[in-house]
Image (cartoon, rainbow, N blue to C red):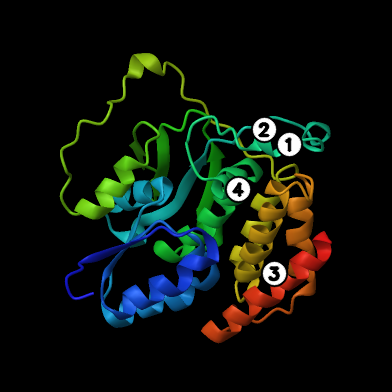
Amino acid sequence: MSTIDMVLTALVGYAGLMPTIKAIEAKKSIALANKETLVIAGEIIMKLAETYGVTIFPVDSEHSAIFQCLVGENHNAIEKIILTASGGPFRGKDISFLKNIKKEQALKHPNWVMGAKITIDSATLMNKGLEIIEAKWLFELRTDQIEVVVHPQSIIHSLVQFEDGSMKAQMGLPDMKLPIQYALGYPKRISSNFPRFNFADYPNLTFETPDIKIFRNLQLAYDVCTSQGNHPCILNAANEIAVEAFLNDRIRFLQISEIIENCLEKVSYLRAPNLEDLINTDKETRTKAKELIQ
């Protein structure tokens, strides 16, 4: 790794945890596209980064937006952050509609082109839930300082509200090339020929409150962000197994949340887990989730 300055961690899910740890221990800057790393072991990762003097640059569009909004600002002045969500393909739909969802419908995201797992997470709002936990660790926030708002156009990528009541937002077309380039080039902005935003093409930017009764994953994520311990690890592992089962036509769309909730109830809670505890929690949760699916 002697010739490497930065490692872009972009593996999907739990698989990204150990490579990120190894890169930090090698004292390489991290461009973090694998949110699950901080969901599973946020406290451990951030302490490790501090120990090795490593900077973590967020690549998720929402966290990149928050990072950009905080450049030049005093962190103590943050009142809250607002993470925007497109709402996914089923925004505004009721339970009766969601009961019969097929994977082909869930894989059609209205704004972003992504892999299958994250696209399903966006449809269930689990992706936003994972981002809540990621934001807690990246920006040293309490759970009650993190708000989610549905913004169907995906032009405002996220916002920061300061203690004086003012707000800063980062805007742009929904294109992951922008936050990736920002992380790789920081602190410089690299000139690009990417498409530019035209206000005339977006005469209306709208906002809604997410429905956490229908999209239960978002509430589950808020809950584990507060309880912490190994709960976020359980949430993530159960979700990975449930989403895989849904993509393989083994469970229905609404069962994803049921499996996650069941695992959170049945897998033992650890208040202050170490890395080995979290690895074991991940294994135990996957076993439990698979039992529930059979």
Tell which circle, 3 or 4, labels the residue nearer the N-terminal end.
Answer: 4
Q: Could you tell me residue 181's position as x and y percent?
A: 26, 47
Give the label, 1 or 4, closer to the camera: 1
Q: Is residue 237 left or right of residue 156?
A: right
Q: Quadrant of the C terminus?
A: bottom right
The residue labelled by disc 1 is: 102
Tell which circle, 1 or 3, labels the residue nearer the N-terminal end.
Answer: 1
Compare residues 269 and 1 and report the one nearer the observer. Answer: 1
> What is the distance, in whole Å, between disc 2 and disc 3 at their CAs?
26 Å
> What is the distance, in whole Å, between disc 1 and disc 2 at their CAs?
5 Å
Label for residue 105? 2
Callout 4: SS: helix
Query: Mark 3–mark 4 contact, CB under 8 Å?
Result: no
Label for residue 286? 3
Query: Mark 4–mark 2 contact, CB under 8 Å?
Result: no
> What is the distance, in whole Å, between disc 1 and disc 4 at their CAs?
14 Å
Task: Work out whether residue 49 can be spotted.
Answer: no
Label 1: few (<14), some (14–19) or many (≥20) C-alpha neighbours in 10 Å: some
Q: Is residue 49 left or right of residue 185?
A: right
The residue under label 2 is which amino acid type? Gln
> What is the distance, in whole Å, between disc 1 and disc 3 at their CAs?
23 Å
The residue under label 3 is which amino acid type? Arg
At horizontal 54% and vertical 40% (from top left) the residue drawn is: 149
Callout 2: SS: helix
Tell which circle, 1 or 4, labels the residue nearer the N-terminal end.
Answer: 1
Query: Mark 1–mark 2 contact, CB under 8 Å?
Result: yes
The residue under label 1 is which amino acid type? Lys
Callout 3: SS: helix
The residue labelled by disc 4 is: 121
Tell which circle, 4 or 2, labels the residue nearer the N-terminal end.
Answer: 2
Question: For residue 32, which quarter of the picture?
Answer: bottom left
Query: Mark 2–mark 3 contact, CB under 8 Å?
Result: no
